[in-house]
Image (tube, helix red, strand yellow):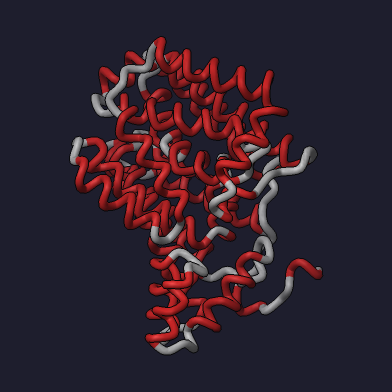
Amino acid sequence: MLRSYLIFITLLSIIIYSTTPGRNKSKGILFCQVAGILLFLLYALRSPYCGTSDVLRYQEGYELYSSFNFSTTIDEIAGGTLEPGYLFLQWVFGNVFGFQWWLAFIAFLSIGSTMYLVKRMSPIPYISILLFFSLGFMNFEIDGLRQTIAMSILLWAYYPLRDRHLIGFLALVVLASVFHSTALVFILAYPFAYKKIGIIHLGVFIAAAALFFLFKDRLLPILAFFLSASDHFTELYALGDGVSLSMTGFYIQLLLFMFELFFMNRVICRYPNSALLFNLAFIGLCFQLYAAFIGVFFRISLYFSFYHLLLFPMALSVIANKKVRIFVTIAASLVFLAYSLFFLQLSDYGFFWQHVNLTEV
């Protein structure tokens, strides 16, 4: 059922984008408004039974914590049961609104911050939205409520990072971390932000790949030992589907990055701040390499791989030959849509008023 909605959103958005008179910028604004509203409704009106059982556990926690008084809530925060920002905000929200409104609020944060960045920076917004599906953001954000809030905050951290405002950048990263502690890893973006893609990056990637492919049997127990201080870092995938799925994600990101690198000089020439995007995408690629065996690295990779949504359309837009540019754009659109619909493990979908446990259907 979710596949049908994705087809509807994609086709409607592309029709609006291609038939609206005016310059590309005005088309992009209208597209982002329409697609943003449709995606928000898809998120906000979903049943808690969509996706995995994580959302139902979030619902149980929401109803439990909303029944606490202020002092009990402070005690829970002090006990470190959940990230303090998430626990306190859901307590405040839960004293006024039900869980469905909480889902709608998170959807507003997520889709609002995503579409704002896409509207301002993507030269081909509908490609950005297709990548939003293909790279798994939509599917993940249905389940990962805490990290969705953290990611929404980190998208705003892009601006102080771009403008080299260290204090503002750190403040937003710390704020995001009180909703999901993995957000602290985004601090790595700052020292990499202004490095030119070159031999250092190649050396880092070769070293990371060598460690993974040659020494993973020795490396993984060491990583597990050092990361076990946090519950988030104990998510080790067993050999099997988790490995193949994460490696597929790695190869997709690698292909995207190679295509973007091919046009890097042109992209940086036309979009002066895009060097930062290349560095963010590179960091995401390195984390995704290890996601096959340490599950939380997939979550961390999302903070950085998001910027393919901006970088890939930029690379498409600088193809000099118009016919080639149109052909490659159409081909990429079809590939992303086909992958999202037929190969990505999309969550079952139902509206909240259906009250159907989709896992039992």
Q: Position of residue 350 (x, y in %)?
A: 65, 68
| Numbered label tally | 0
Can residue 8 be seen in this snapshot? no
Which residue of the protein is positioned furthest toward the top in this rendering?
A: 199
Q: Position of residue 82 (x, y in %)?
A: 50, 67
**Rendering quarter of residue 46:** bottom right
Question: What residue sits 39% from the left and 66% below the top?
Answer: 85
**Rendering quarter of residue 220:** top right
334 left or right of 282? right
Q: Quadrant of the N terminus?
A: bottom right
34 left or right of 211? left
Question: What residue sits 41% from the left and 55% below the top?
Answer: 150
Q: Quadrant of the C terminus?
A: bottom right
Question: What residue sits 53% from the left and 34% below the top?
Answer: 287
Question: What residue sits 52% from the left and 78% below the top?
Answer: 62
Q: Position of residue 133 (x, y in %)?
A: 55, 45
- Name above or below for residue 70 compared with residue 325: below
**Rendering quarter of residue 143:** bottom right
119 left or right of 95? left
- Name above or below for residue 96 compared with residue 213: below
- Name above or below for residue 175 compared with residue 216: below
Can residue 185 be seen in this snapshot? yes
| 50 or 223: nearer the viewer | 223
Q: Position of residue 210 (x, y in %)?
A: 61, 17
- Name above or below for residue 210 compared with residue 104: above
